[in-house]
Each structure stands twice: as structure tokens, then as C-alpha cells.
Amino acid sequence: MARIFSGIQPTGIPTLGNYLGAIRNWVTLQAEHECIFCLVDLHAITQFQDPATLARQTREQAAVLLACGIDPAGHIFFNQSAVSAHARLAWIFNCVARLGWLNRMTQFKDKAGKDREAQSAGLYVYPNLMAADILAYHATQVPVGDDQRQHVELTNDIAQKFNHDYGVDFFPEVAALIPPTAARVMSLRDGTKKMSKSDPSDQSRINLTDDADQIALKIRRAKTDPKPLPADPAGLEGRAEARNLIDIYTALSGETRQGVLDRFGGGGFGPFKEALAAVLVEHLAPIAAETQRLLRDETAIDAVLRDGAGRAGAVAEPIVREAERLVGFLR
Ligand code: TYM
């Protein structure tokens, strides 16, 4: 039984991208594996967060994940800052990872944009903290969307260099588990940009708490091109927005692209968009309703996270203490 670790930043309501790329996988993996899921608030502050908003969003995000089916009793569910082992191991990894490795990280380049000099040092070393999250538990499987692939590869580079430098075989190799479809859900406004919970435009994404009217409106307004839908998947090449909508549909309905195009190919986007909105509402309405129910008792949510943090710490503490001993820290 592999140990699974994954995380999500509490910087907004989880989106359909988070759901199809990661959360849905987390829920199913629980049936067969020991899972540890984390709200990564240390990662969130690599870009400034208003304190009251961060606290509220951490709780809201916990509610959404519980509503999606994360089982906090059978598995471990907590917020990162509550377990100090993450930050301690991350510091060691800051001293193991090379600047050249971090300079290759595409997500830093995307997030920093042109203004590199003005970014926090935390944003730059963010992937080292992510490696610490995973390796503090000796987890070996990491269910993520496609955008995290490079960070998981870096985790292996860090583990190997640590093992090599200290002459041990201590940190295991880890594998990214990336879904076959919808591993990179794109913005509804721009098919070249990833759907993101922190995009300034709410119209660019479906939030897991959107109601049926919001979903229908966003899908109706979703950017498309003027051509009809193609009869076969090859016709989606070069049509990023059309492909994105078809892929969302296939990921939710379990059909193939060809199956969907057999029904909607040759026609305009109108009827397809209506069907897409319906399938989204069918999947997301129960999550939104359960989230609202859970948020009526904030104390209960905080207690779930506190309990998870206690159990996470019990797993991570001996592993990180051993890493500290290997490095030569006196106790
Ligand atoms: P975050 O918060 O950006 O996203 C959480 C998860 O959702 C996936 N995802 C997507 N998948 C498909 N399409 C999209 N448009 C989309 N947007 C996001 C992400 O790939 C991710 O799996 N660095 C991570 C959090 C993290 C982590 C970790 C993950 C911190 N420590 C350790 C795994 C293991 C992040 O910012 O995810």
C-alpha cells in the first residue's frame, strides 16, 4: 500500500481545474491507499495574503474538500503550518537544492512574470517546501495536475542529492499521478491560460461552490471560435477553447472525445454548451450544497484540521528528526 501525499493552496475556492486535475483523484485513491492531504498555507503566503482572508479561505477550502469526499477519519487532512516538520525539512532542502535547478522551474517564471526582483524569496524556494511536504512522510505517490509535474521531478532530484551527500538511502523515489484527461483545464476566457483560483476574472473559472445559474452563465459566455464543432478529435487541433470544453465534458461524463463529437460534431456550440452546463451542475451541485452545510459549523471544521495536524505530526516528526540527525544536528 503506497503512501499518498498531496496539497492545495488555500488561496481561493477550489476550481473545476483543481477538481479534475487532483481532488477527484484524491477521493478515489482513499479506497486503496493511506492518504495525507494538506491545505498548504505556508505555500500560500509566498504571495501576500490578507490574514483574515487566508484564515477564512483555509476553512472554506477545508469544507469544499470534505464535501468532495475527503475522509478525515480514515485518512489525514490538515493545514501545513500546524506541523512544524514541513518548515524544518524545507530549510534542509533549501541547502540541498541548487540554484540552477530552481532557475529552471517554469511555474516560478510564470508567477513572477517580468518582475522577478520584486518576488519574495519564498516564491523562489517554493518547490523545496513542496519536496519537504512529500518527503516528510516518505510518501511515494503524488496525485497532481500536469502543472506540478516539474515540481515532483525536482523532489526526486532533491531526495537523490540528500541521499548521496549524506551517504544514506533515506528518502524514497516519488511518482506523480496525473489523470489521463483534463490534467490541465484551461481558462474559460482564454484557452492558452490555465484555469486558476487566483485569476482576477471569476468568469474564467468554475468554482466548486458555483450554483446552477452561475455555471450556466459562465459556460454560455465561455470563449469559443466561430466554426462548428468537428466530427472527429483531430479537428480540435489548434482550437484550444473548443478542445478544453470537450475535454471537460469527457472527463465528467466518462465518454471518449469521439463519443462526444459523434453527438455534437457538425453543430454549433449552443446545444453542446447546454449539455456541458447540465453535466457540470449534476456533478457540482451536491458539492456546493454540502459545503454550505459544513460551513454552518466552523468549530467542527477547525477541530477536523487540528485532529489531522496531530496525526500528521506523529508521522512526520520521526522522519524529519532522523533527517536532522543525519545532517548532524545535536539533540
Ligand atoms: P494548487 O493549489 O495550484 O492546485 C492544487 C492541485 O490542482 C491542480 N490544478 C489543476 N489541474 C488541472 N487543471 C488546472 N487548471 C489546475 N489548476 C490546479 C494542481 O496541479 C494541484 O495538483 N504546489 C501545489 C500544492 C502543493 C503540493 C505539495 C502538491 C504543495 N505541496 C505536495 C502535491 C504535493 C499547488 O500550488 O497546487
Image (cartoon, grey):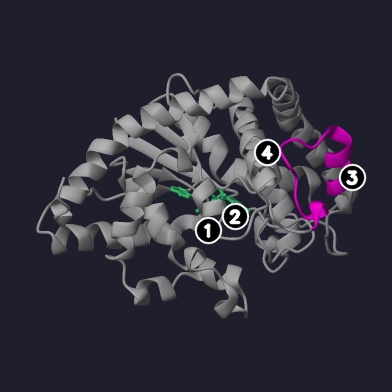
Residue 50 magenta-highlighted: no
Task: Check disc 4: other Cα within 10 Å, few if <14, some if 14-19, many if 20+.
Answer: some
| Label whose residue precedes the other's in the sequence (4 or 2) | 4
Residue at coordinates 37% horizontally, 47% vertically from top-left?
86
x and y percent of residue 144 in the render? 49, 48
Residue density around tag 2, few if under 14, some if 14–19, many if 20 or more, within 10 Å: many
Of label 1 and label 4, which has the lower sequence position?
4
Badge 1 crowding class, 10 Å Cα cut-off, few under 14, some 14 to 19, many 20 or more, is: some
Give the label on residue 147, or none: 1
Q: Using the image, determine if residue 302 lies above or below residue 46.
A: above
What secondary structure is marked by label 1? Answer: helix
Residue found at x 74% / y 29%: 288
Amino acid bearing label 3: Leu
4 or 2: mark nearer the eye:
4
Asked where in the image residue 167 lies, by quadrant, the reply is: bottom left
Residue ID for mark 3:
217
Q: Which residue is mark 2?
A: 184
Looking at mark 2, is its residue's CB closer than 8 Å to ligand 1? yes
Q: Nearer the viewer, residue 233 or 270?
A: 270
